[in-house]
Each structure stands twice: as C-alpha cells, then as structure tokens.
Amino acid sequence: MQSLTPQRLIELRLAANDVRQGIIRSLVAAGSGHSAGSLDMADVFTALYFHILRHDPQRPDWAKRDRLLLSCGHIAPVRYSAMAYAGYFPVDELLTLRRLGTRLQGHPERMRLPAVETTSGPLGEGLAQGVGMALGGKLDREDWRVYVVTSDAEHQCGLHWEAMMTAGKFKLDNLISFIDRNFIQIDGSTEEIMPLEPLADKYRSFNWEVFECDGNDMAAIIATVERAQTVKGKPSVIIANTVPGKGVSYMEGDYTWHGKPPNKEQAALALAQLQADREQIGAVHV
Amino acid sequence: MSNVNLVESATAMHLVDYTNAAALESVPTRNGFGQGLVEAGKRDRNVVAICADLSESTRMLAFKEACPEQYIEIGVAEQLLVAMAGGLAAVGKIPFIASYAMFNPGRSWEQVRTIMCLNETNVKIAGAHAGVSVGPDGATHQAIEDIAIMRVIPHMTVVVPCDAVQTKKATLALAAMFGPAYLRFAREKSAVVTTEETPFEIGKAQVFREGGDVAIIACGILVYNALMAAAELAKEDGIECRVVNNHTVKPMDEPAIVAAAQTCRAVVTVEEHQVHGGMGSRVAEILAQRYPVPIEFVGVDDRFGESGEPTELIEHYGMGTAAIKATVRRALSRKV
Ligand SMILES: Cc1ncc(C[n+]2csc(CCOP(=O)(O)OP(=O)(O)O)c2C)c(N)n1
C-alpha cells in the first residue's frame, strides 16, 4: 500500500461518492437503466480512473494508455460517471444518458465514445477482447496493461471460458480482470440460477492467479491491484466482493434493483444518504 | 376476380375499429406469448420452457408459476439454450426457448442452423424485445436483423404476429405444429387490432383492409401503423390501400402476395427490421419472379438502432404513420 497516503485515500473516497451521485442523477434523468451493479462497482471504477490506470482524459487515443474494458455493459452508468469526474467530458452530460442522439448510449458504444475502448452489453464478450489486446501488447513488447471488468453472471457464457483458457495459455501477465461478485442476476441469486462456486478454484485450474478483496473498500482494492501487477507469467483475476446497490440503503442486497432506476423521490433519498456519507468521509479527514 | 378466394376477405377478420382510439387496447405482444405458453403447457405436459435469466421480460414467469415442473432456468447461456433444447426435443419434449431476439437467435445462430434446422428438431424460439422499439437500451439490444438470419435457413418457420392476441394464437399454433420455428415479438405496449374471433393460421396472410390503389404488406406491431396510414390516406386523399397482415414470413403466403400485387399494381412493405433481407425482401423476391410491380420498403435502412424512447425511435427511423403515407404516395407515383 505504499502508494496510498491517508490524504489520498480520503480524496479517492470522496471521488467514489461523486461517482455514486453521478450514477443516481443520470439514472433518474434517463428513467431507465441499471442501478445495483453500477453502484456496487463505483469504488473499483474510481480506483481505476483516479489511481490505477495510466491514462490521459485529454488524449483518449494515447497509444501508451492502459486499456479498460467494461464487459458487462449494462453498468455503463458507473463508467460514464467515473469518466465524467475524471475529466473525459462535462459532468452535466451525464444527464443525457439513454436519450436520442447522446454519446452515452444505454450500453456503451465505441463509435460514439471512443474512450470506452469497445462496444458492450451482450454479456460474456469482454474478456476475449481483453485477451486479444493483451496479446497484441505483448507481441509489440508494450508495457501498458489491460484491465477488464466482468460481472458474475457473465461466467455463465461459454465464450468467457474460452477466453479464460486462452489467457492462461498465453501467460498474459499484462491482463488483470475484475469480477463484480455481487451474487445477483436478473432472475435472482447466481447460486440458484446457475451456481458459480467454487469460482476461485475454477480460475486457478485455468492457470490464473486469483485474488479476492472487499470490492467496496478503496484501500483493499488498490492494495490488491498492486499485488496483481507484480504477478509474472499468469493473468490475474480479482474477485471483488461487492454489495449490490452499495451506498443506497434501500437498494443494498436487493436483486430487484438490477435493472431499474430510482424514481424522483427515491433518487432524492439516495442523494441525501450519499451526501451524509460524504460528510462522514470529510469528518475523518479533520 | 379469383383473387378473392386466395385471401380471407377483410370483413371476415373481426378486427377492432382501429380508427377509434377509445376502442383500442394497448398490450405488449410479449404478454400474448406468456399467456399462450401457459395454455400450451397445460394442454401438453411435453411443452417445456427454458429460460436464460430473463423470465420477467420474456413473460416466461407465468409459465414458471403455472407449470413449475416444465420450467428450466439455465442462466445467461443462449447457445446452451438451443443445444440443450435440441436434446430435449430429441427425447420427445416440445421446448420453447426465450431470450432477447438479439441473443437468441442472434448469438446462437449456428446452433439454430445445425441443431434445430439441419437436424429438424421440434424447438421453438421466442425472440423478445425485437426491433428498435426496445428503446433506451440502445443498438446492442435492438434486434433488427433477426428475420433475415432466420428466414434464410431451410426448414425454419418464421412468425411475426401483429398484436398480443395474435401472438397468443401463434404460440399455441407453433406448439401444435412439428418443426423448428421462430416467433418474434416486442417489448412495448402496442395496439390490439385483432379479436378472439379473428382467424389465424400459420402461412396464411390476412387482408385487414380492402383497397385497390396500393397494397401495404406489413408484419408485427407496425401493422397498426399501416392500418392508420391507410385510413388517413383514404380520408385525406381518397387513396385506397389494401393492408395485408403478413404474419408468416416463412413459409410466405405467395398467392396472397401475388394477389395483392395484381389488384393494386404497387406495393409497400412495412416491418420493424432492416430493409435488407427482411420480410419485404422476401416479398420482392416473390414479385420479381412472379408479378413485377413497383415496390417501396418501410424499415430500417442499413443503419443500427440507438437509445431513445420507443415511439420516438419508430419515427426517427422512418416507420411512423407519416412515413408510411409518404412511402405509399411514392409507390403510387411509380405505378404504370
Ligand atoms: C448475452 C446476453 N444475454 C442476456 C442479456 C440480458 N442481461 C442483461 S444483464 C443480465 C444478467 C445480470 O447479472 P450480472 O451480469 O451478474 O449483472 P448484475 O445484476 O450484477 O448487474 C442479463 C441476462 C445480455 N445483456 N447479454
């Protein structure tokens, strides 16, 4: 954890709070969209955009940038919000989410917003593209990395396993994949719909290095990524244990928030809770 | 003319008075699928439903509650959906498999071709959320190529019913018919123009409105827009359109298509799908060979969809009533 001073940690937590507020504002403006997964990945996306990634919001096409792929495209609101606060586009643009003509499509589209790296939404396709990018980077002896964010239910898609096997074969130590392990999908709990456990063992047997952390703990996320960055000769996966809807009490742990937005009153309540949390973070600072 | 015998006449269709907005109910076509599936499952215990983590949106949820032992949940795995259904069909089951049309049959196309069609198994695909009217989810979720990729496969039956009541009838008809089939329906509420009394037979197109100036051949929820366009054209300009509900895209009712062309000598096709390769393309294939007349196409013109509100997108992509009227006038001006 050498890179993280207490002051920096507070800044990152405040940034994650901004990102959560941006998610709520964009979802209520859109009137549709995915709340639970977006909120629970706010800490990981903040860690990535504000601390981990080698990137430049002013130059999204910089050849030496780290590549970040969002495989489960339905949680686009968290990526858009983190990008806006990191300086890729004005925060106000978040309010155009899902509207006709917007760059912020319901599911991310590279041709409209190149910095998302690829178009996603159909599940299970991100890791395979990440494998291709990581292999390309290796062939060119580049030092940039590839980060992929996946959902747990995506592990029910066959292509994802083909990609896992391939990453192991090519020893892609420039590839770090996250799993949003929130145990929910649309029809209920992942373990009822199609059991994924023991998930860590599955990755190990495919020749991956496996890390687990509390995906809603900023310090733990960063420490875990820093360990993964030192792995040689293998791809790494970080099982980020998250609470669906994290940060908004009435959504936390409830799978029915997978694919719906808060209404106006619910959004006001969510923003009030987040604002109160924010003051807590500030209080720790003094 | 003998054409009259080839198609059901409009008065025998027992339609709702679609020009009277107050008389119209608005129901998503997917609800008709849900109801039909429950009835099919109760009639025949061999009917099974396989769901890929979309029980509510595809309306399989009612079946899960009504026939729990015939319901199978497999998670996000659309290729598995088709392959496993092929296995179930091989041992005598009648599997209905449902997801968004974009993923099934979009993602599972080769399994559909080999396991369902080349292998001729009795599997029924229910493609939900078809068309741009899915709305804000955007292009990745808007299936507008599914008719093309299904109608091109030998042995496949492709049905695109016009409203919720007809979708229920189509579901029951497909359950009773042996062979691979694709049923396409939509997410949003749409006008119910047919009634319980309206006949339905797979492969038999229906004349919903009589007219001799231009034939509008439509399928799916846009049949209502076609009817409205025809009613407005009659009132405003005295242009009389025959409106054909061409719900079975494959095998298409060739006599009905030829009859419409013979009577009107100009055709407009209407579908919530790419113009390239869709229902209208099949109409053009038939007429080019058997009775060439000017044809105009209403549909998505070689573009992807995008986020927006459902009706807003229907207008944006030129499939609203006004666009259909303009297309009819264009077809009329080309008539020889
Ligand atoms: C190939 C494919 N099939 C189905 C869907 C529809 N869908 C969207 S999200 C989802 C599953 C949700 O579970 P998870 O991916 O774990 O996301 P979370 O609920 O944690 O946000 C499904 C089935 C899809 N996007 N892609």
Image (tube, helix red, strand yellow):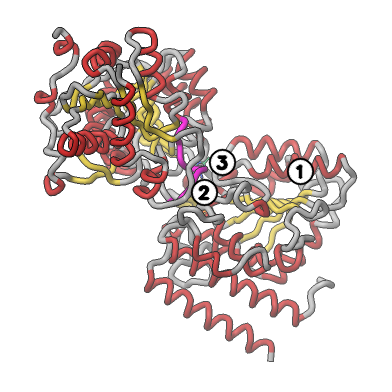
Residue B237: image x %, image y %?
Answer: 19, 35
Disc assigned to residue A133? 1
Of marks 2 and 1, the one in the foreground = 1
Q: Is mark 1 within 8 Å of ligand 1?
A: no
Q: Amino acid at mark 1?
A: Met
Magenta-drawn segment:
B136-145
Q: Residue at x 40, y 14 (%)?
A: B285
Q: Is mark 2 within 8 Å of ligand 1?
A: no
| Residue for badge 3 | A156
Q: Secondary structure at mark 1?
A: helix
Q: Amino acid at mark 3?
A: Gln
B33 magenta-colored: no
> Disc 1 is attached to a residue of which chain?
A
Residue A86: image x %, image y %?
Answer: 68, 68
Residue toward you, B239 or B185: B239
Q: Residue at x 44, y 65 (%)?
A: A29
Choose top left, top right, bottom left or bottom right for residue B71: top left
